[in-house]
Image (cartoon, rainbow, N blue to C red):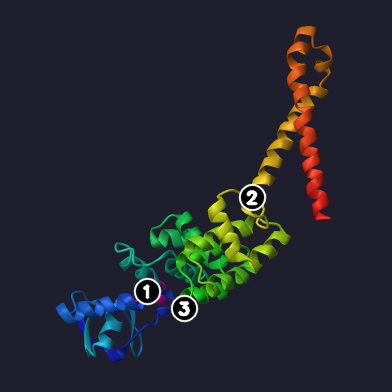
Amino acid sequence: MAKLSSRDLNEGFHNYRMIEPDQVNKMVLSLSSVGQLHPIIVQKTDDSYNIIDGVKRFRASVILEIEDLEAFVLEVDNRLAKAMILHYNRKSNSLNIYEQGMIVYSLVHDHQMHQQEIAVYLKQSRSWVCRRLGLIERLTDEVQDALRMGNITLSHARDLVKLPRGNQSELLNIIINQKLSSRDSKILISLYEKANDKDRAYILAHSRQVITQSRINQIDGNVRLSIHGNKILKSMELYRLQLNILGGQLRSPASLHLNNEEHTILMPPLVSLIAPMNYLSETINKMNNHEK
């Protein structure tokens, strides 16, 4: 245990942490009322100390102008120091999946470790490593910057990662500019994923309208149609399905061998279908002529 001057401490591993101002403010209240309860953990370097665990305590101490902090000083390399960031925050779950992913990504790209090797090193499953590495590798730098700056939440990022990297920027801008909640962004991205190119262009141009319509309608349909339009589309799909089924049965060779009793039973309801089908045909023609 040692007492270290705050001037000798630095956040050398700050890229792996996303600490909200509110978290620091709570630590300010804690330090000012009860003092430092736990030592910070630091890595000794040639001329200073990198904070491994205790960033919030350090930032709060700077605000309170506390000159010295109690610390455990460790002489470890950067690879082990990064693993220790995960270790010291495991019980409290204070690292989110993105922060964990950044450390895993660094172990792969900065320290040339393989996924299985990292899993053993961190005492995690390979799937745990793979999920976190995949999150970082599939998110564009633009999305990651927005996440780190607080312009979007982790929930937004986890929805954006479902899209190809080339499509993330357009949806990111809509989320930020329209201040979409994570719930609304989830709806928007889900619709965008399923849409064709023409509908995607419409979604981007009318995002708020599409989200509202989807939340009210609660059915899968064409994003360019109103609620009533989607009801017509759904009814039409069901009608076409039933019509194809009926037509297939009537065209079957077995229909030619129905006996007289079967004809007697079946023909009246079949004939009764002609009038509503004629009415449907007239209605469609009227709609078509009105459009012209």
Question: Which quadrant of the structure image shows residue 209?
Answer: bottom right
Disc 1 or 3, which lies upstream in sequence?
A: 1
The kind of residue tagged 1 is Ala
Q: How many marks?
A: 3
Q: Secondary structure at mark 1?
A: helix
Residue 161 rendering spot, x and y as whole percentages? 55, 63
Kindly identify which numbered label has been placed on residue 81. 1
* Res. 91 visible in picture: yes
Query: Residue 145 at x, y = what percent?
Result: 51, 77
Residue span colored magenta: 73-81
Of residues 179 and 226, the one drawn nearer to the viewer in this rendering: 226
| Residue 52 makes an appearance in the image | no
Residue type for callout 3: Met
Badge 1 density bin: few <14, some 14–19, many ≥20, Cα 10 Å: many
Q: CA distance from mark 2 to mark 3?
A: 41 Å
Lower sequence index among marks 2 and 3: 3
- Give the label on residue 228, or none: 2
Find numbered disc 3 in the image and state the secondary structure of the residue it sits on: loop
- Give the Cα distance between marks 2 and 1: 59 Å
* Mark 2, secondary structure of its residue: helix
Rendered image quadrant of residue 43: bottom left
- Relative to 244, say whether 41 is above or below: below
Residue 284 - label: none
- Name the mark nearer the viewer: 1 or 3: 3
Q: Quadrant of residue 66?
A: bottom left
Please tell me whether residue 43 is drawn above or below residue 213 in the rendered image: below
For residue 162, side relative to residue 78 (left or right): right
| In magenta segment, residue 77 | yes
Residue indicated by mark 3:
149
